[in-house]
Amino acid sequence: MSHIISDDIYLLKEEHEYKLKSDPSAEFTSCTTFIKQFFSPFNADAVAQKLVSSVPKYAEMTIEELKDEWTAAADHGTQVHEELEEYILSGAEPKEDKGIAGKNWLIENIDLEKFTLYPEVIIFCKELKLAGTIDLIAQHKKSGSLLLFDWKTNKRINKRAFRGERGIHPASEQLDDCNFNHYSAQLSLYRYLLENNYNCKIHRQIILHLDETKSNVIDCDYLESTIHKMLEVL
């Protein structure tokens, strides 16, 4: 992992921009932003308007109240990510229920005699001008192969698109426009960068969907041909 983890690249969190110490003028698109362009943009105002006007459970909420709820959920997800990173690095106990669920899953399923854990690993490709942060990499000590993990704290992982909507680009038009495929494409892009820029062997890509009591394991296929098509836009 020493050839992957680098002090040269860092993330400006507020701006969500990746920078190189050795080349401050270098610019990168985050992997998250890159994948988003292949699907319909999320219009928070329009979605909130539709929900409060047509879904009974949101009928007593204003548009702004619903958007504030989404913001709070995103902030909570960030907190859980940070708690799990600190737990892995220092053993600090998570306080949030979903952080505790993630910790318990690691204890029960990852044998630290066989694997080494690396949280929040930044990878990049200067040629493609892409960079991203992998929530967790588990490296098998004997084989060197990697497991890629993506923590998710949202309410549900949808494998079907609303009203059958698909990606909006020829590279993604075969994919349902649902969060499972968004996450799968992002993990696949990480895999592509690791295999082609870092000469790594990837064993699995996994979404760990956390709720208050447990972690649900969702395996993701490697969307290799899709990623190749997506990268043609660069």
Image (spheres, rainbow, N blue to C red):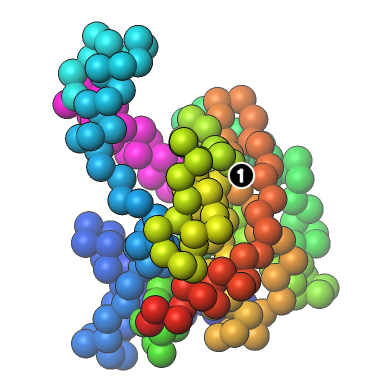
Name the residue type under label 1. Leu
Q: Which element is circle 1 on? A: strand
Residue for point 19% across, 24% down: 63
Q: How many marks?
A: 1
Please state the horizontal and vertical placement of residue 113, each as a whole percent of the image.
80, 59
- Residue 57 lies in the magenta stretch: no
Vertical comparison of 69 with 210: above or below: above
Q: Where residue 21 sits in the image (x, y, percent)?
A: 30, 84
Give left or right: position of 151 versus 215: left
Q: In the rendered view, does 159 fall on the left or right side of 36?
A: right
What residue lies at 64% left-to-right and 36% top-to-bottom?
Answer: 215
The residue tagged 1 is: 208
Name the one closer to the observer, 159 or 4: 159
Q: Which residues are magenta?
A: 64-83
Magenta-drawn stretch contains 70: yes
Q: Is residue 79 in view from this perspective?
A: no
Q: Position of residue 62 (x, y in %)?
A: 18, 18
